[in-house]
Amino acid sequence: MSVKFQETTKTKVTEAATAATDAAKKAGDKSEDLSHKIGQYLTGGQAGKGYLAAYLKQLQTNPLRTKMLTSGSLAGLQEIIASWLAHDRSKHGHYFSSRVPKMMAYGALISAPLGHALIGLLQWLFSNRSSLKAKIMQILISNLVVSPIQNTVYLASMAIIAGARTFHQIRATVRAGFMPVMKVSWITSPIALAFAQKFLPEYMWVPFFNFVAFLIGTYINTHTKKKRLAALRKKHYGEGRSNIGGGGPRPSEGY
């Protein structure tokens, strides 16, 4: 009797384990199927009809237009994400401020054409040169010529977007921010360029650098907004303390 009971128990345990294994396998297959379908939908698989394939085709057939659309979209998205991370709302209480279309215009009409011209020139100078010496020279020229030009234009554009209208205001903004921005460029640019040299075709360089700039720009923009908001709150709280009993202003959550 006990032997039969043990055998029955073992059989049930084995059946349960088998069922659990089959269920896990089916779930894994479904998960792999879903991942495969998403990947195929984005890249197009072997047929080359996905979103990524379509984007790469446009990048080769209409390079400047595609780069302008990419850069403009990323610049606008950067401003929205930075505002959200810093809790920097407009006077209407949302994160879509007047800076968003201005940043999109900067990305599409200034940053993308400038990057297209400068990186195109850099690639032309070092075309058919793949030696280690040529790659190092390309990195040096990128950091000592291309990056300073791009960063100067970026800082001047940000000054105008922020409200600067005179040459002296723009120059003061560029002089104050040039070296901090260049230090970030000197750290990230060699790594990004070395990666592009090794793994990316030349027509993918500008979108890749735009994406790197998007990540760095979002971080810097968020940090700058947080500092500005902290300074505004400190100023208003200071005024409030100096006017205790006099109904001094309180800091608004909309800053």
Image (spheres, grey):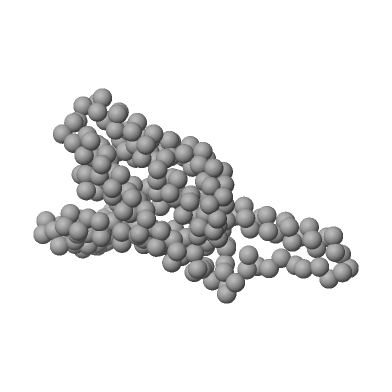
Q: In this view, does 234 lie to the left or right of 157?
A: right
Q: Residue at x 37, y 55 (%)?
A: 110
Which of the 4 image quarters holds residue 201? top left
Up the image or down, 111 lies above or below 93; here it is: above
Residue 137 in view (yes/no) = yes
Farthest-out residue, bottom: 92
For the N terminus, the image quarter is: bottom left
Task: Locate residue 228, reporting x and y percent.
Answer: 62, 55
Farthest-out residue, top: 133
Q: Residue at x 68, y 55 (%)?
A: 231
Q: Is residue 171 left or right of residue 189?
A: right
For the C terminus, the image quarter is: bottom right
Front one among 100 and 52: 100
Task: Locate residue 164, reporting x and y percent.
Answer: 55, 57
How many dots with numbers?
Answer: 0
Q: Is residue 204 left or right of residue 98?
A: left
Farthest-out residue, right: 245
Q: Residue at x 43, y 36 (%)?
A: 187
Up the image or down, 9 lies above or below 98; here it is: above
Task: Locate residue 222, reporting x and y percent.
Answer: 53, 54
Task: Locate residue 134, reporting x and y percent.
Answer: 24, 28
Q: Residue at x 25, y 56 (%)?
A: 64
Farthest-out residue, left: 47
Q: Is residue 208 left or right of residue 75?
A: left
Which of the 4 image quarters holds residue 6? bottom left
Front one among 201 and 4: 201
Front one among 217 and 2: 217
Residue 43 in view (yes/no) = no
